[in-house]
Image (cartoon, rainbow, N blue to C red):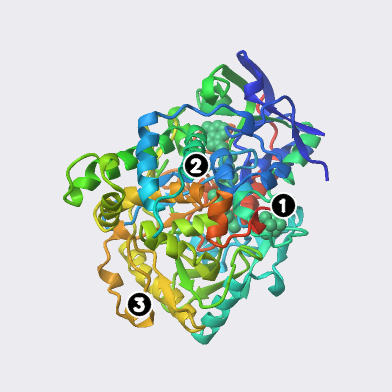
Amino acid sequence: MIPVQSGRDHTERLELSCDVVVVGSGASGAVVACTMAEAGYDVLVLEEGPFVPYTDYGAMRPSESLRYTWRGAAVTVAYGLGDTPHINMTMGRVVGGSSVLTGGVCFRVPPSILHRWRTERGIAEMTEEELEPYYQEVETAVHVEEVPEEMRSRSTKLFVLGAARRGIEMRPMKRNTEGCNGCGRCNFGCPHGAKLSVDLTYLPRAAHHGARILADCLVDRVTMKGDRAVGVTGRLLNGKHGKPGSEVVVHARRVVLAAGAAFTPLLLKRSGVHGVSGQVGKNVTVHPGFRTIALFDDKVEGWKGAMQSAYGDVHDPEGLTLTSLFIPPAVLAATMPGVGPELMRRAQNVPYLALFGGIIHDEGGGRVWPGLGREPILTYRMARHDRALIPALVRIMGEAFFAVGAKEIYIPVLGAPPLDADAFRAFPFETVKARDIECSSQHPLGSCRMGKTREHSVVDPLGKVWDTRELYVVDGSIVPTSLGVNPQLTIMTLATRIAHRLRETPLAS
Amino acid sequence: MKRLELVGKSDVRAREPVPIGDGLVARARAVAEAMFATDEGPPPPKRLDWLEKELRGFLGHAGSSARFVFGASVYAVTLLGPLVSGRLGGFASLDLEARKHVLERVEKSFLSTPLLGVKAILCILYFEHPDAARFIGANGACLT
Ligand SMILES: Cc1cc2nc3c(=O)[nH]c(=O)nc-3n(C[C@H](O)[C@H](O)[C@H](O)COP(=O)(O)OP(=O)(O)OC[C@H]3O[C@@H](n4cnc5c(N)ncnc54)[C@H](O)[C@@H]3O)c2cc1C
Ligand code: SF4
């Protein structure tokens, strides 16, 4: 057994010391904790969320996973400013972070994006050759493999065929799985231990090498002594109903922030670390995501098969990625328009529905603001170019489904009725108000972006917060621009690269 | 491979939920009764009792900002909804037909976003009931 402690099992103030404290146990924090622990450092991981053993997921309905492991039970919003939809922005809050909730999809950063990092952001070292060994290390640790065609759900197969008929090539996805049986509930925690999220890979390795993991522990701020980080303070969530209770004080020789793109900027600001760039909490990109649902005459039962298994890049217009997904029947029923008998009739069509999604390679425009309580306020203003891509994306997805005989399409527009092919083609998408468009995101990035100069970025290319000592950021917040593809593998790779340097850098005495 | 295990007894499912106000739950129930009515009439009261219990559990663990967003959305729909559709009187006091009419109008009004939030949570919970799941043809296979 490799133990995890819960802050709820302590009743008093806790004072701890370590070499390296890692705030957040998600995709990036786990990687750094593991690398440092394996190198012999005394590591402490603090995680706000609870610990849920993967074996418990099989006994949980999706709504139970939502309430226990998703931040705010997924009722989390980035408020759209101007001509921008509100975005349902979801994140994990559990030991293992959002990594526990992914569809498992793994992409390397596209070469064109690396090129931008070098030319526009001046980070000359971001080359494919530089990142190669770190990608390899992560891909081996979490077992990245291609999803075989036979694992595709019928929903995906239909779309892939339709896309081919419309001239769009779809390719197999890679996922971090081993022994997947295609039960399709990846987003609610894999009950089979087949999705190799960090709670099953990096964190056990870290703990095996002595790292301590404390769940239900909310970090409030970094303790700074001049420009040097010397620990963190926070609260154990041992108050009534899990509210913040006893104080926790950690003395550390190095502080690594891995709380995710929505929280790390708040931690920095609360700790008085604003930087000269004024960029903390700005430049957030989200990959705005849109779904299209199609009704077929015969059964699809799209929840049977790997939830995510194929993707395709759209080249006209540029800037869109099509990506397979599925959601459990109860959640799918929730997307049907109408109320009463109309809703219930449509809900009975759930087995006949296919679903596909697409994301926009966005330019940014998101911002993290301090909220009244613990949670941040997220806002997002979509670039005009990105906004114009929404109708194009929905049209492409709808046409792919019509090419394989869909009867009707449900578009992501609130209250819109299902549309047959003629109605779909005549639908005035361009005039739909942004507020009426359904949009979601699972990929907040960039709120403490990495860069070459303190004037334009929050951290340097090795994750060190400019003008501080022993304070590092390693999570999705450092990603310099939108990736246009799912980010977990890249976040973990950048974290690995930083961790390799950290383990070679002597600690402050 | 070795797995992580918790020391102590903090199983998430055994945790006490934050109590949810009866007023909010009653309003949500009134919405659900209209939302899930079929041509045969409203859902059986027992199903709504189950939904109420689930809603309390869900919101009780969801965190304060989720409770705030859901609560504000329910109040927006049930207080402003009747006005938007030209009805007088509290939402819960309207008969079933009138409530359905209000929700239909709300879905096409400026209140569509709050209604989406309410509908999404109520639907996710409602259709997890084994009978409701069967009704929509879900066989539970994706839960194992
Ligand atoms: C539903 C869903 C599906 C996804 N699917 C995919 C996919 O298929 N492929 C892909 O590449 N990406 C996917 N992603 C995105 C991916 O999971 C994230 O980009 C990645 O996990 C981010 O890593 P991170 O380390 O920055 O943050 P996270 O993994 O989110 O970890 C941050 C952790 O820090 C904790 N924390 C925050 N604040 C504090 C604090 N003050 N004190 C203590 N702890 C704190 C949080 O509770 C959380 O556990 C998905 C995300 C979601 C939500
Ligand atoms: S589809 Fe595979 S990876 Fe996803 S939950 Fe099922 S077994 Fe796990």
Q: Is residue A294 in view?
A: yes
Viewer-nearest residue: A397 or B24:
B24
Viewer-nearest residue: B116 or B28:
B28
Quarter of the image where the N terminus of chain A is located: top right
Which residue is at a point 50% across and 55% down the rendered structure image? A331
Disc 1 packing (10 Å; few <14; some 14–19; many ≥20): many
Image coords of residue A296 (percent x, y): 50, 76
- The subunit carrying tag 3 is A
Q: Is residue A461 in view?
A: no
Which residue is at a point 33% across and 41% down the rendered structure image? B74
- The subunit carrying tag 1 is A
According to the picture, the residue beneath numbered tag 2 turns out to be B46
Disc 1, SS: loop
Q: Eyeballing the image, is A485 above or below B54?
A: below
Disc 3 packing (10 Å; few <14; some 14–19; many ≥20): many
Q: Eyeballing the image, is A432 above or below A65?
A: below
| Foreground disc of the pair 3, 1 | 3
Image coords of residue A155 (percent x, y): 57, 71
Disc 2 packing (10 Å; few <14; some 14–19; many ≥20): few
Question: In 3D space, how far apart are the residues under numbered discs 2 and 3 (Cα atoms)?
Answer: 40 Å
According to the picture, the residue beneath numbered tag 3 turns out to be A424
Image coords of residue A387 (percent x, y): 33, 64
Disc 2, SS: helix
Question: Mark 3 is on which residue type?
Answer: Phe
Q: Determine whether label 3 and label 1 are within 8 Å by CB.
A: no
According to the picture, the residue beneath numbered tag 1 turns out to be A196
